[in-house]
Each structure stands twice: as structure tokens, then as C-alpha cells.
Image (cartoon, grey):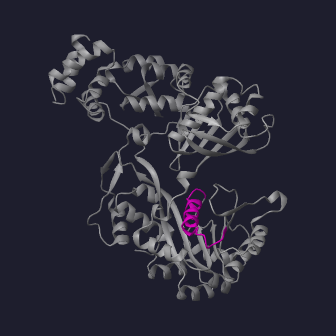
Amino acid sequence: MANREQELWKDILVNIGLVTEEQLSFALREQNETGEKLSDVLVRMGYISREDLTRALSVHFGLIPVKLSEYHPTEDVIARVPPSIARKYKIIPLEFKDGVLTIAVSDPLDFLSIDSLERVLGVKLKAVLTSDREIEQAISRYYGVEEETIDTILEELTEQDISFAEGVAQEAEEAELAEEAPIIRLVSLLILEAFRSRASDIHVEPMANRLRIRYRVDGILHEVPAPPKRLEGAVISRIKILSGMDIAEKRLPQDGRIMVNVLGRQLDLRVSSLPGIHGESVVMRILDKSSLLLGITELGFLEEDLERWKRVISLPNGIILVTGPTGSGKTTTLYAVLNELNLPDRKTITIEDPVEYQLSGINQLQVKPQIGLTFASSLRSILRQSPDIIMVGEIRDTETAEIAVRAALTGHLVFSTLHTNDAAGAVTRLIDMGIKPFLVASAVQAVMAQRLVRKVCPKCTEPYTPDSSILKEIERAIGTLEGANFVKGKGCPECNMTGYRGRIAIFELLVISEELRRLVLSRATSFEIRELARSQGMKLLREDGWIKVYRGITTVEEVLRVTQQDVVEGVA
């Protein structure tokens, strides 16, 4: 390294006490031997953290430090910097405003001067600073992976990592597009990396000029490296063949299924295709039995609500409803309940669409509307099977609701789901579906609304103080702020720089008391039902969320994201 550059590093790090002169000299000798960047050597040898290094560089060069996870550049902005330039100079365009393009750099010492790069790109630039890792991830996310990189990754993939069910692979060999080894291994890698990332869904989406691949992790979509656009057709054909779809049919949506063993775990992938203007998009939903079969103590109940829930599900008869939008964890909750109640002296039958997992000791039935096997017809038939416990995947129509109520009133314990915003809304929804209020009041024992929030990553937590208005709302819900543990994740490799890892449910448990039954008989509104339930101790979804924020489990932003303000009107 030239003496001038060595003196520059000395100014940046030694003179402000971040590293010693001896450490810098040792790192320089190591760099000469390995050819690494000096910044990487300093971090690898433990002389300085990546965060302190970024801060020192930002101060010295007058660049604002940023987190790329907070930026969402549009395709137009990304297109302003060609992939070759982004990779060569390790820069990422972030936003274009008032004729100025903001770019992120990671190493000002290894960076082409702004003036020179402005001439190359033909636009005025403003630079901000971020870490090497974030730049590399962003280049992969927005520009895809170079074919050389894909080849290197694929060479490391072995049959021990991932294998498909017998018969499927043989069918795959019959299709010319999916026959080539690189494509077969590429799709395998796609599934393997999704599993390693804890993804629940894989989205393969053709865009106008590229192929976009996204994983849904903890409920949020994240873009990941994608193969070149020219491989799009082969990748999608391979997925369609594995899932038993007709690869020649590109005009109509299709559904399929893939059974695959990943790192010793048996996964069930539910696949759907959808034709679009740029080609067929494919979504693979990953069903991992081990992640679904939780005990009721693992769902996220607060202590007092867990005891109330245990009492409710131990009742001999009645309807117990779980409500929430798609993806709010209703199936996981119901499976946890069924496992809890799965005893030799009880007969349990489920009606599902689809049967997501096979539960030992439980009779499970999958509806098939195309042959007339609906929720309603199935429920009518299984009542003749003398069940003790019935689980109906969803009450979708009046007929199903009527039969479920009748079953509950004739000595069966019935579990089901509804799509309502809160617990009280489920009671009035049944009445709106045509069920008489006296039947609803007699049959319904409890309703639980739920949502999923992301948990703060335990590896990168840091304390913070929420806004004063939020603090007031939390204090109203809990009664105190003393002992609060407000934390958020600053982002680390463990959580893919998001600050979150894993999810937990927040609940609103409405247990129907005698006073509430009388209110239902009078055709009360959901607001009136909710307010009486609150006076009897029910916590609203947001209030349950605030307790989990107070305890350092999740963040204010997560609770606000999944709850509605109108459900806490009148709380103040």
C-alpha cells in the first residue's frame, strides 16, 4: 500500500483511537499476504467492528451512514446504473430527486471519484455510506446473480442437501426444458435457500426485463438473487413438472404439489401458477410440519389468557371460533388445540381445504367442491360418525354455519375460523349470515381474534424510546411504564439485516359470559359486545400487542402494522 494511503488510514482510525499503530501495521502486513481489503482484515482480526469502521469512514469523508433496508429504490432508479457499473464500483442507486441520483458506497478509499462517475453515468451524484455486506446483498437483489456466481453455488449443491419424491424426478426427465442439470440444480437451490431462510413462500415472478424471486420470511417479502431472464422459462417449466402441472398450458392458472426432502426434513410445497403479461408467475408455499405443530404454550399467550384458553377448549360442547385474515396463524392455533385434545377416549374429525398436515390419531377429510364434497356436505356426513370434536377449516356460508351450530347444540365441541377484524365481529357475522341470535347466543362459547407480529432479533437488540403518544397508549393499556423493556433490532446477518427473527401471535380472547349472551340475544352491535367484554377483562389485539412491546418481544411498528386504530376508539 502506498505511504499516502497508509497515512490516510492512520488519520481515519489511529488518530481517533479506534486502532493502534501496531494493529494497523500488522493488518497491512496481513493484507499484503492475503490480498484482502484492509477494512476486511481489520474486522476479521477483531481490531474494529464493522459498525465503528463505517462510522469512522462517514465522519472522515463527510458521508451520511445509512441502512439500505430502509430504502426501496424503484426499477427506474435501479436502471440508472448499469449492472456492470454497480458491480465494478460496488455502488447502489437509492433515489433520484431534483436531478440528483443518491448512491450508496461502502469503501470511499476504493471508490472512483464522484466527478469521474458522474461523467460515466451522465448524472449528478450524491454519495452516502453503508457496509460491504449490504452493498453485496443489494447488488444481488436488484441486479441478480452473475452466471459465474450461480455456477459456483450450484457446484456446491449435493443430493444429500435436497431430493424430490420418487417418480417426480422421472417425470421431470421427460421434459426437455427441465432436463438440463444446471436448471434442475438451480430449482433445487431455490428451494434449499428458501428453507434455510425460514421462508413460508417462494415467489417466482417474470418482470419486463428480468426474473424476480422473492421469499416471504416472517410474513414480509424479501427479494433474493435471481438467475438471468433467459433462464426464466426453463426454471418455471421445471417447477411445473415437479408439481405435476401441464407445462404446455400457459393460459390458465394451475395448482400442484411437490414433496421434497431438504436437509433431512420432509417438506410439502403447494404450488400455484398464474399467467401474466410478462409470463407465468409461480408461488410455492412451504409447509413444514415441525413449524406448524406447536403446543398451545408456544403460541404466545400471556399467562392469564393461556389459562382462560385452556378452560375454554376443555368445554364439552359449543362453538369456538378463531378469526383473522389469511396468514394470521389460525391453522397453527387450531392444530395446537387438536394436539392438546387428541386423547384415546375422544374421536376427532377435521374438514379442511386443504389438509395441510396429517395428524396422528385424528380423522382428516379434504373437501372437493368439484364433486360436491363441500364443507357443509362433509359436516352433515361426519355428524353420523359420532365425533366428540369437530374442526371445520372455515365457515364460508350460511349452510355450513347452520350445521356447525346444530352440531354444537347437540353435544359436539366444534372449532372453526372466520374472516373478521376482531373477536366481537365474529358473533355479529354469524347473525348477519342468517343464524338466529338465540342460536348464536346458545352455541358460541368463545371467539379468539389473532394476528402475527415479527419478534425482535435476539442477536442485535438495542434499547430505544417510542414516541410520547405511543408511550401514553401503552401506559393506558398496561397501567405503568415502569420496568419497560423497549427494544428493536438494528439489523445483523442472523436476521438478514431486518432486525426481526421469527413471529409470535397477539390475541383478543372473547369468552361468552351470561351477560354477553343476553346482549347477543338483543342483536347488539359488535362495538357494544366488545365494550362489555372489555369491562369483563378482555384485552384488545392492540393492547395485547402493547404488552409484548413492553416486554421487549416485538416493536411498536409491528403492532401498528397489524392492528386497526378503530378497535381501540373509546379506550382513552
- Residue drawn at 73 percent across, 78 percent down: 434
Q: Position of residue 184 (x, y in %)?
A: 65, 28
* Residue closer to the observer: 266 or 309: 266
Viewer-nearest residue: 54 or 118:
54
Q: Is residue 181 above or below residue 362?
A: above
Q: Is residue 122 visible?
A: no
Q: Horizontal placement of 114 versus 423: left or right?
A: left
Q: The C terminus appears in which quarter of the rendering?
A: bottom left
| Residue at image point 26% right, 34% down | 52
> Viewed as shown, does residue 305 lie left or right of 354?
left
Q: Quadrant of residue 167?
A: top right
Query: For the point 54% across and 19% down, which residue is it?
Result: 148
Q: Position of residue 80 (x, y in %)?
A: 52, 26
For this rendering, which residue is in front, 107 or 419? Answer: 419
Location of residue 555 in the rendering, given as x and y in whole percent from the top left corner = 39, 56
In the figure, residue 65 lies in which quadrant? top left
For the record, the magenta segment spans 326-348
Badge count: 0
